[in-house]
Image: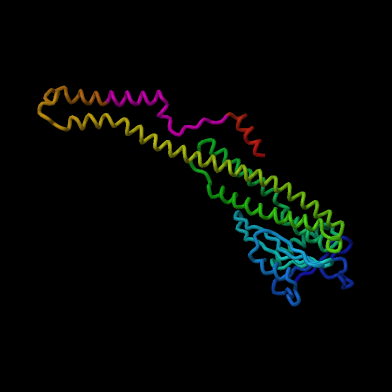
Amino acid sequence: MRVWHIEDGRLVEGSASDGTGSRGRIEALDERELDMEGAGHVLREAVAQMPHAYVPFIEFAPGMAAGVIALPADASNGAPPVNVGVVLEPTRLRLIGQMEACGEALTFLAQERVPMAGAAGALCGVMRYAVRDHPVLLSAVRRDFEVLEERLLEGHRRVDRGKMMADARRLMGFDALYQGMSDIASELSEGSDELVAQGDRLRFHSLARMLDRLSTRLESLQDYSLQLNGLYQEEIDIRQNSVMQWLTVIATIFMPLTFITGWYGMNFPTMAMLQEPWGYPLVVGVCLVIAVAEIVCFHRRGWLHFGGRRRPHPSRHGSARRKTK
């Protein structure tokens, strides 16, 4: 177990010098260190759901609140999902499980001297720490989508489909995280003064607004992802149509030639030109003329331009991209 306390509105590691911890005591402990004797239904339910929670949540009971902060896995760096149990009391905050991650967050809050009025303020700081890098992550996902869009519009046949799907899964995880944490921040910002001090309620209001901004950016990126999936599927359809068009043109060119060779393959004695020395060259010439005439006809009709895609006008491309921002 690691212990911090609030002194002069700042987080300090270690127990309070007077031993009371009246200004706020924060504990990061392992699940095995949690004393469940006499625990109420809300706490027991939160602990039971902690390993399986996908969306952050918090439930209230008289004089306390308990829930789970569930951070999604990050496939880009192989980071597993992080689920932390939360038990909030008027002068005490317990963070259960993932002691290394909790210790890192609380150490950061202590070093940065983040202001807080009570134990709830420490929880607000931990929640804000959990999403501190998300504006950068969302910008990175957008850059990935823009690169993919450029490659698709330029007609590249190979794109990093795996990265595209990894970014889409990351956005789904962020969606659940923002919704759950926004609900927690809103509920605690409207909680009683006994559980959340007035200064900390304002901090939860600020956190809720930040999560709303992230959710707005996330919604834009999800729409962008759907557009890219549609564009990618369109490229696949164009390729398939191109293959079928090639097969159709080739079959059409050889159809009359096959008819001629099949007709003269019957070898009836009375057939014309069988006995003439110029019969064979004539048939070969007729076949060549038919093939060339068909190719010229197909070319004039534009049937020989397979899978061609005109590059979009830069201004039109730019305006379309601005709509997704």
Q: Is residue 213 left or right of residue 157?
A: right
Identified at 73% across, 46% down, the residue is 213
Identified at 69% across, 66% down, the residue is 98
Q: Is residue 113 left or right of residue 67?
A: right
- Residue 103 in percent (x, y) is at 74, 65
Q: Which residues are magenta?
A: 288-312
On the rendered image, what quadrant is the C terminus found in?
Answer: top right
Corner quadrant of residue 301: top left
How many numbered circles are shown? 0
- Vertical arrangement, residue 293 with respect to residue 133, above or below: above
- Residue 108 in percent (x, y) is at 77, 59
Is there any visible trace of residue 198 in the rendered image?
yes
Residue 166 sits inside the magenta stretch: no
Corner quadrant of residue 246: top left
On the rendered image, what quadrant is the N terminus found in?
Answer: bottom right
Is there any visible trace of residue 4 in the rendered image?
no
Viewer-side residue, 111 vs 52: 52
Q: Is residue 106 left or right of residue 161?
A: right
What's the colour scheme?
rainbow
Q: Is residue 25 left or right of residue 168?
A: right
Q: Which residue appears farthest toward the left when viewing the image?
A: 269
- Residue 285 in percent (x, y) is at 24, 23
Identified at 54% across, 50% down, the residue is 162
- Residue 23 in percent (x, y) is at 87, 66
